[in-house]
Amino acid sequence: MARVAVVGAGPAGCVFAARMAQLGHDVRLIEQANFPRNRLGESLTPGVAPLLKSAKLEAALDANCLRVRGVRVDWADGPRWREDPHEQGRIVDRGAFDFALVERVRAFGVEVRQPAKVVDRRRDGRRWRLTIEANGGAETLEADFLAEASGRGGASADRKRTGAPTLAVFAYWRAANLPEAPRIEAAEEAWFWGVPLPNALYNTLAFVDPKAFRSTPGALVKRFRAALAGSSLLDDCLEPELVSDIRAVDATPYLAADSVAADAIRLGDAALAIDPISSSGVQKAIQSALSGAIVANTLLRKPEATDIAMRFYRGHLSDASERHRLWAAGHYGAVAARFGGLFWSERSKDGEPPPQMRPAGPADARAMAAMPVEMSQEASLVETPCLGEEFVTVADALSHPGLAGPVAYLGGFALAPLLRSLQPGRTPLEIARSWQVPLESGLAIAGWLVSHGILVNAADRNAGPMAQSVEAP
């Protein structure tokens, strides 16, 4: 059993601590702030709930949570209402949500130090030695492994900016008739996000260029109110009352270069900060914690796989960073066509996907039953690090120019054995029936392979000579 120290008890730190405890490690979670406290990241994307469930922390979503039925959007195409009848998105009071996460983590045997501040950390031989200030005194904690999950403050200077410099300026309001749904709006030199919270408060955020905002004359409150005047976030509120200080925090996306070592890992914003336009920062932080726990468990229990585990984690973060960068740039580019101006053009740079990222088309149901197919010559199997249940392993993965990266599993099934058993000249339906998987899953996999250009029409002479099977290099 290894002792693991986790610094930061936000979603990334709590999920990582819970998973490491479930994997049998002695975990200490250290958090500087008292909970509850306000924190950005109040809008949760639909993917958060299943991720929390995988860590057995889904009960935390019951704490002061609102389901989102729709969002009022004023973006590239003007004002519209974007509805989600299934109410998959959620808005949480981050104070209550984070507090609930910590309480759930305690139930897994994690020892929580809060409030406690790490004032010094250093390697002492093969272990970490942390000096912690708590309860008016100092104490020492030794650990075999250190996880940094204290947000942007935990990111090292060795990081690469992946988007335009951005400042988030925000404050909380109370009014008799607060908006019932979130709002997102674009303006000429900023964009805005309004979030009605479960605790009857309303968070208004302005995302601005740091240099332009700071060079504007006047006190912070004056500049903030002037910025909000360019939006409709408060238009429906009667006598809105400002009930918090106005804060300005860095919201620039970046990727840390030193995300993992043999005895340490960075999680969440300490490793990767994505552009706030996606509203999926919490989801990405939890994903990094879940994969980071498998990486850390591998580093601790299978040191012979250190290189593979570290390579996986760095690649995982780098791929996520690039996907979000391209998506955000494209999203901003749509507004650049509407407003023009430096603010939008800077954020939409290099927004087009690279040429090899060919969009997938839908698989035709009739072709699935009638068209003989075989493997594209552009497809191959490559060895790639993959996440297992407890460890990072090496598996054969499908590589193809139409894919964002190698794919080892689809629908919970390993692709390599399915592809190796494929006989050219059969229809996708026949192929699905030949695989030792449920027919519904086989059809879904075969359809995905067709739509992504992996399986091609065997009668198409333009495809060139067809491979008989996929061979690992």
Image: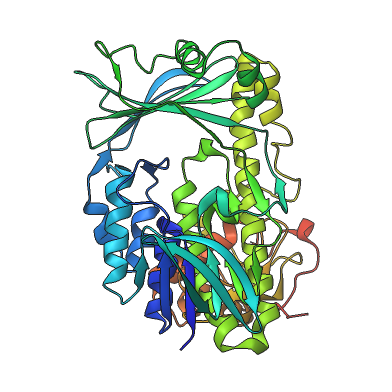
Q: Nearer the viewer, residue 144 or 194?
A: 144
Asked if residue 406 shows in the view, the reply is no
**In-image side of 256 versus 203 (left or right):** right
Residue occupying the point 47% across, 45% down: 280
Whether 69 is drawn above or below 27: the answer is above
Scheme by which the image is coloured: rainbow
Residue occupying the point 63% across, 71% down: 122
Query: Residue 428 at what x, y percent from top left?
Result: 53, 67
Residue occupying the point 42% across, 72% down: 28
Query: Residue 159 at what x, y percent from top left?
Result: 70, 51
Whether 320 is drawn above or below 427: the answer is above
| Quadrant in the picture for residue 336 | top right
Quarter of the image containing the C terminus?
bottom right
Query: Residue 409 at what x, y percent from top left?
Result: 54, 72
**In-image side of 344 versus 176 (left or right):** right
Query: Residue 376 at what x, y percent from top left?
Result: 71, 65
